[in-house]
Amino acid sequence: MALSLVLLLAGCGINQIPQKEQAVNATWAQVQNEYQRRADLVPNLVATVKGYAKQEQETLTSVTEARAKATSINVDASTLDDPKKMQDYIAAQDRLGGALSRLLAVSERYPQLKSNQNFLTLQSQLEGTENRIAVARRDYIQAVQAYNTELATFPGRFWHWIMYSDKEPHANFRATTPNAEQAPTVQF
């Protein structure tokens, strides 16, 4: 009798909520991993550009400051549900991304820098990292959607009410850049 009850419970979705919550935590860790990869590339990129563009000190300073701010804010599994902390973290990462865009624009003014192998390698790694960040964000959004859906639908809603009432829906990833949904205008 007890064995059949355990088998019945195991097959009815009782474990879905903790499994999906762990998936949310794991995908958020991957987002942080990609942000860290970008932060690790920045000092090398700045050092390479610095050798060519001494007069671009303001841009280099803004990149360094944005990196410091982005790496000073930590969001882990225990604070994923804090919308303010998430917003601050995402805003800092967005500022770093903007500063990096300005840094890459500096390279357009220095043809010898564009042909420097170190710069080209770092630029390629940074572009790849930006793509990896986008994929990690997408995966996180999907994991949050699956978790929140489990809490809101049957039988997850039942198990949430009975056994996991302390579990709250997770906040989803939100763009913090104003008008991020509009494509930027590019003028030459």
Image (spheres, rainbow, N blue to C red):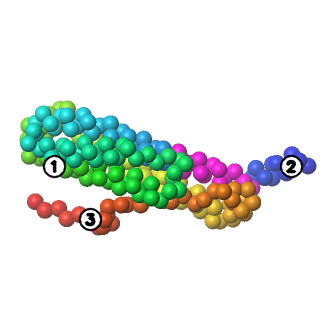
Residue drawn at x 17%, y 47% as measured from the top left: 59
Q: Nearer the viewer, mark 1 or mark 3?
A: 1
**Label at residue 4:** 2
Where residue 107 sits, quadrant-wise, is top left
Where residue 161 sits, quadrant-wise, is bottom right
Residue 157: % across, % down: 68, 64
Q: Nearer the viewer, mark 3 or mark 2?
A: 3
Q: Are marks 1 and 3 in contact (CB under 8 Å)?
A: no
Please give the range of residues in magenta: 12-27
Q: Secondary structure at mark 3?
A: loop
CA–CA distance in space, label 2 to label 1: 65 Å
Q: Secondary structure at mark 1?
A: helix
Residue 77: % across, % down: 53, 47
The residue that disc 3 covers is 183
Residue drawn at x 25%, y 42% as measured from the top left: 64
Local crowd size for mark 3, using a 10 Å CA cut-off: few (<14), some (14–19), many (≥20): few
Q: Nearer the viewer, mark 2 or mark 1?
A: 1
Residue 119 horizontal side relative to residue 173, left or right: left
Amino acid identity at mark 2: Ser
Taking the magenta stretch, the answer to whether it contains residue 35 is no
Q: Is residue 51 visible?
A: yes
Local crowd size for mark 1, using a 10 Å CA cut-off: few (<14), some (14–19), many (≥20): few
Q: Is residue 131 visible?
A: no
Numbered circles on residues, count: 3
Amino acid identity at mark 1: Ala
Where residue 65 sits, quadrant-wise, is top left
Disc on the earlier residue, 3 or 2: 2
**Residue at the right extreme of this rendering:** 1
The residue that disc 1 covers is 105
Q: Secondary structure at mark 2?
A: helix
